[in-house]
Image (cartoon, rainbow, N blue to C red):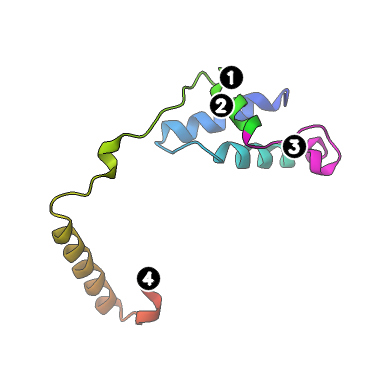
């Protein structure tokens, strides 16, 4: 669909995956950026025929163009650790130490 840009988009997305990144709407943003850099007139918004949207991204990414499969998240990630209160207290202690060490005002802590 995007001709010679397919290869460049594919390489970029594969690099994101190899680095452990999650590929979702990033496909749309990446492709739009590459197309804008190469020839923005290909985009539908500029009078071209290329409409990069969610259905286009699914087609590009999941329908064998990159040889990927759609994965579903596990339910294990939804469970909080049993010692969550200990983790919270530890995080608060670290943030407080850094705040005091660098004399940061409360307004900059979020």
Residue at left offset 25%, top offset 38% = 76
Position of 72 relative to 81 (above/below): above
| Residue 49 x %, y % | 81, 32
Residue 65 shows which numbered tag?
A: 1
Q: Distance between the residues labelled 3 and 4?
A: 39 Å
**Which label's residue is closer to the chain start, 3 or 4?**
3
Is 74 included in the stretch rendered in magenta? no
Q: How far apart are marks 1 and 3 (CA)?
A: 21 Å
Is 43 included in the stretch rendered in magenta? yes
Find disc 4 in the rendering and name its residue. Answer: 110
Asked if the residue under mark 1 is in contact with the one under mark 2, i.e. CB atoms within 8 Å, the reply is: yes
Q: Nearer the viewer, mark 3 or mark 2?
A: 2
* Quadrant in which residue 86 is drawn: bottom left
Within 10 angstroms of label 2, few (less than 14), some, or many (20 or more) residues?
A: many
Find disc 3 in the rendering and name its residue. Answer: 38
Q: How far apart are marks 2 and 1 (CA)?
A: 6 Å
Locate residue 105 relative to residue 44 in the image: left or right: left
SS label for mark 2? helix
Residue at left offset 61%, top offset 32% = 57
Locate residue 13 relative to residue 85 in the image: left or right: right
Find disc 2 in the rendering and name its residue. Answer: 61
SS label for mark 1? loop
Asked if the residue under mark 3 is in contact with the one under mark 1, i.e. CB atoms within 8 Å, the reply is: no
SS label for mark 4? loop
SS label for mark 3? helix
Q: Which span of residues is magenta-colored? A: 39-54
């Amino acid at each position: 669909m995007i001709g010679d840009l397919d290869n460049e988009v594919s390489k970029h997305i594969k690099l994101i995956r190899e680095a452990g990144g999650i590929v979702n709407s990033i496909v749309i943003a990446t492709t739009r950026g590459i197309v804008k850099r190469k020839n923005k007139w290909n985009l539908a918004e500029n009078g071209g025929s290329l409409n990069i949207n969610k259905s286009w991204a699914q087609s590009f990414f999941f329908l064998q163009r990159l040889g990927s499969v759609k994965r579903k998240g596990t339910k294990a990630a939804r469970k909080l650790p049993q010692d969550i209160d200990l983790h919270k207290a530890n995080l608060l202690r670290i943030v407080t130490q850094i705040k005091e060490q660098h004399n940061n005002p409360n307004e900059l802590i979020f």
